Image: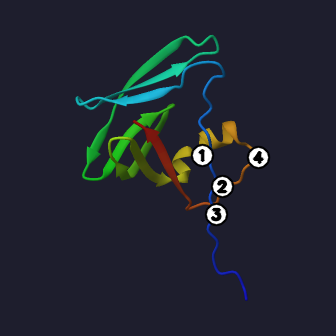
Amino acid sequence: LPIVGEVSSMEFVYPHKANCDKDYIEFLENNISKTYQHQDDCRVTFTEQSWSKNDNTITFTMLGMEIQGTIITLNDSEFVIQSDVSQYASLIAEYYPEISIPQQAKINLYLNK
């Protein structure tokens, strides 16, 4: 039988700095988010940017990329946003240049609370 479709799953682990605490993002109630990143010496820097939510659609900036996605899980321990892979193209190319991601693929961004 011919293959008419294929579903695959890839996992990309966020590139935290070795021997440092994990980077993180805070979504504050005043529609400001803060992204905290560790430098090579584990010093923490942060950037502030705005975010918005309309029903289950969220738009925010992460690592210089504007992300718009659909909230598929939001509970006490997990926050999952699904969006089009094209929004992560520069990040994937930088950290995983050997991987070819199919167009129209979806990315689930898992944010632990």
The quadrant of the rendering that contains the C terminus is top left
Residue found 36% across the figure and 43% down from its top: 59
Q: Are marks 2 and 1 in contact (CB under 8 Å)?
A: yes
Q: At label 3, which amino acid type do we have?
A: Ser
Helix, strand or loop under label 2: loop
Residue found 29% across the figure and 29% down from its top: 28
Q: Nearer the viewer, mark 4 or mark 3?
A: 3
Residue 14 position, x and y percent, is 59, 36
Residue found 64% across the figure and 72% down from its top: 6
Q: Residue 34 is drawn in which quadrant?
A: top left
Helix, strand or loop under label 1: helix
> Which numbered tag is attached to residue 98?
4
Left or right for 101, reference 111: right
> Which numbered tag is attached to residue 8?
3
> Which numbered tag is attached to residue 101?
2
Position of residue 105 relative to residue 6, above or below, is above
Task: State how far apart marks 4 and 3 are (Cα).
Answer: 17 Å
Task: State how far apart marks 3 and 2 are (Cα).
Answer: 11 Å
Q: At label 2, which amino acid type do we have?
A: Ile
Of the pair 47 and 80, the residue shown nearer to us: 80
Residue 95 position, x and y percent, is 68, 37
Left or right for 40, reference 46: right
Q: Nearer the viewer, mark 1 or mark 3?
A: 3
Q: Nearer the viewer, mark 1 or mark 4?
A: 4
Helix, strand or loop under label 3: loop
Q: Residues within 10 Å of mark 3 (few under 14, many from 20)?
A: few
Q: Which residue is mark 1?
A: 89
